[in-house]
Image: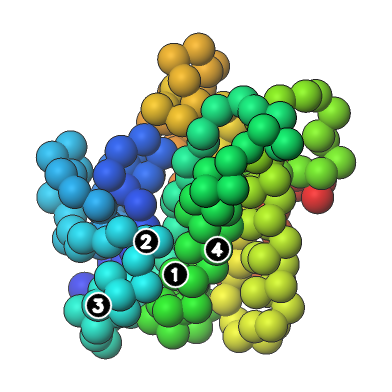
Amino acid sequence: MNSEGKRHALVIGASRGLGLALVKELDRRGWQVTATIRSGGGDLPEVAVETLEMTSAEQLAALRGRLGGARFDLLFVNAAIDRGDLPIDLVPTAMFTEVMVTNALSPLRVLAALRDLVVPGGTVAVMSSEQGSISRNTEGGYELYKASKAALNQLMRSYATRHDGDGHTKLLIDPGHNRTELGGPGAELEPADSMREVADVLETQAGAPGLQFLDRHGVTVPW
């Protein structure tokens, strides 16, 4: 915690959607929040705001420099794009690269760059999806998005193995199907409601050892 006794969170990817909703919920709970956005950010509450395009190594290095000696109880990385429902053999190479870099590679680069800012006993969390569960992939569609989230989960597993014993709680979070730009208007969940439940999970799991893949209710999602 910081000198004022408040828990301090760094939320990466808070321009809109789930990231924005999470920032609002943590702020409502009294957390001190630093949020990163690509641009805009007019809907954010009164929190510290930094600019970051997380696919840019240069911008990530600059953010790390600006944060200096800041310390966080929670580092939460939220990033995902979807480029439609194409069979994988019809996905252009450039599209495949874009989705994989954004959804899988960039979140792990963020963790590598910023993990030293997380206090002992703090939490490192990444927004994943049930769509990344291989065992639950029993319905067709959205093959590239599913693959990118499965890759994210695998990379997070490698991260947890490499940094085993660092004292950080490590979480992959499935927020459910939400009415966001990514989830679409027909999704059954409202981001504000989902992020309230996700915040409950983050607070409940603080200090837990190892890596867990959990849904918004704190229930384990099968790999």
- In three-dimensional space, the C-alpha distance between marks 1 and 4, rounded to whole angstroms, equals 9 Å
Residue type highlighted by circle 1: Val
Q: Is residue 24 left or right of residue 87?
A: left
Q: Farthest residue toward the top?
A: 186
Where is 192 relative to 26, above or below? above
Picture residue at 41% right of the left edge, 77% below the top: 114
Where is 184 relative to 60, above or below? above
* Badge 1 vs badge 2, beta-carbon distance below 8 Å: yes
| Disc 4 secondary structure class | helix
Q: Is residue 89 left or right of residue 32?
A: right
Picture residue at 35% right of the left edge, 52% below the top: 13
| Disc 2 secondary structure class | loop
- In three-dimensional space, the C-alpha distance between marks 3 and 1, rounded to whole angstroms, equals 12 Å
Quarter holding the N terminus is: bottom left
Picture residue at 53% right of the left edge, 44% below the top: 95
Q: Residues within 10 Å of mark 4 (few under 14, many from 20)?
A: some
Where is 138 relative to 51, above or below? above
Mark 1 highlights which residue?
110
Mark 3 highlights which residue?
62
Residue 54 disc label: 2
| Disc 1 secondary structure class | helix
Where residue 42 sits, quadrant-wise, is top left
Q: Position of residue 177 (x, y in %)?
A: 56, 27
Residue type highlighted by circle 4: Leu
Task: State whether residue 131 appears in this view.
Answer: no
- The mark total stands at 4
Q: Position of residue 38 (x, y in %)?
A: 25, 52
Q: Sequence order check: which comes first, mark 2 or mark 4?
A: 2
Where residue 3 sits, quadrant-wise, is bottom left
Q: Sequence order check: which comes first, mark 1 or mark 4?
A: 4
Residue 105 disc label: 4
Residue type highlighted by circle 3: Ala
